[in-house]
Image (cartoon, helix red, strand yellow):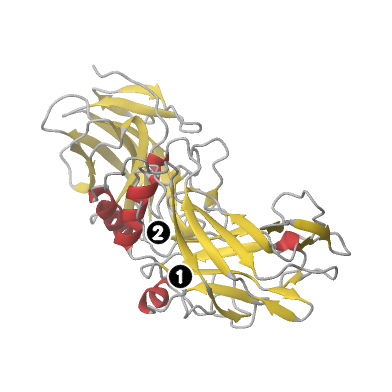
Amino acid sequence: MRKLFAVTLIAAATVLVAPSPAGAASATVQAEAYAAQSGTQVEATADSGGGQNVAYLAEGDWLRYDGVNLTGVTTVSARVASAVGIGRIELRTGSATGPLLTQFAITSTGGWQAWSTLTATAASHPAGAQTVFAVLRNSTGGDFVNLNWFSFGDGAPPAGGDGWIPVDAAAWNAQLAEFRALTPRPVPAGSVRVPEFNATCAYSHSHPDDPIIFPGLPGASHMHTFLGNTGTNAYTTTRTLLANAGTTCRPAPDLSAYWIPTLYQGDRAIEPKDVVVYYGSRLTDPAATVPFPQGFRMIAGDAKLQTPTPAGSVNAFYCAGPGGEIGRSADGNWPICAPTAVLMFHLVFQDCWDGRNLDSPTHKAHVAYSYDGTCKGDYPVAIPNLSFLISYPTSGAASGYRLASGLPSSMHGDAFMAWDNRALGERVKNCLVQKAKCNTNGDF
């Protein structure tokens, strides 16, 4: 009998499905809610909110679930964990030897409580309430997998409405497979052991567009300063980003679009001198990090937040360079920098993902911050901790500034990911997973 132990949640998921939001087009069946079983035991999961799981699953074990509604079901997901596994879970209808509904190939996820969610396409099957058997297959002997739940879905967006953009399971599986197959480069002796790489981006163009909040609506937004992909506008999609090779970022394989509200001094726009887009990790164990899926998008900050930002405020503009801050604007909201210093802002994005959506109605509901150094619960997938370090070529004056979105408290940023998969995967594997500081070229 294997030894059970708790580990940090590993984000090695293909498509990691959090508990479905209200109105989601799926039904979740808890593994322990079987009508009959052979060869299994029930235990508590180690992660918060995971409930119970069925454990000690080996060749020939089975679980029976009655009354599973298969009407309209086109995909099935299974949340699994394995420290050793090579095998598969077969879902069959009617009996343990009945027609195959779908199956999941099981490989090691990193531990018996390191949960990953696999998604597979359902074969043609009868509709309505059906009996579904989960049959365990393994040719090497011994326990090889734990099972938390199954989710039966019709492929519709999980919120059942506009704004939720589910990840393409096949594309994400392929991207993850390529990432897992990469062999990390050895980290040279004496390297700085900080999980980090970056893209260094220059100003590209300005538009009153926002392809995340107002897709297909040119002029619907306040003025934005765009960085990176030179073709970004209201009609931008993942396809158009990848099709346009023009970028103001180094390295060239980063075709992502990044944008922030335009900064003004009076009526004069002040565009950034440069923006370093850092990809890092705040996790206790950065090895859990996986790349962003292609087309991923998110927003940090709040354009609607209009509150004073006196000296010492959190998430405020500041002065960097010799002399630092020498005063405040007349309204107290903006720093005045020494002539030898420049105005700066550091914007930090969320670093935990729900594993199932590229975007959400609020453009934040699919991501969260890792406040305790782990990604867990509804946001179990560790993604790179993105941040913008923005430098403006100005020292300021008593008259202060304004953002296109209003007060400095309204500073926010958008990211729409479109990297070459291999280039991003190599940087995550070499730099973040190995906890090594890399430069713009991805070198140590």
In space, the residues marked 1 and 2 are separated at their CA atoms by: 25 Å
Instruction: Check disc 1: other Cα within 10 Å, few if <14, some if 14-19, many if 20+.
Output: many
Q: Is residue 416 above or below residue 3?
A: below
Residue lying at 38% horizontally and 43% vertically, measured from the top left: 191
- Vertical order, 189 against 197 (above or below): above
Q: Which residue is mark 2?
A: 167
Question: How far across and how far down the image is residue 43, in percent?
Answer: 38, 22
Quadrant position of the N terminus in the picture: top left
User: Mark 2 is on which residue type?
Assistant: Val
Other residues around mark 2 within 10 Å, as few (<14) / some (14–19) / many (≥20): many
Is 382 on the left-hand or right-hand side of 176?
Answer: right
Q: Position of residue 44 (x, y in %)?
A: 42, 24
Q: Which residue is mark 1?
A: 249
438 relative position to 282: left or right: left
Question: What residue do we see at 20% from left, 34% from top?
Answer: 136
Q: Quadrant of residue 220?
A: bottom right
Asked if disc 1 and disc 2 are in contact, CB closer than 8 Å, the reply is no
Visible residue check, residue 307:
no
What is the secondary structure assignment of the residue under circle 1? strand
> Could you tell me the amino acid type at mark 1?
Cys
Apparent side of residue 273 relative to residue 37 in the rendered image (left or right): right
Looking at the picture, how far across and down is residue 357, in whole percent?
46, 56
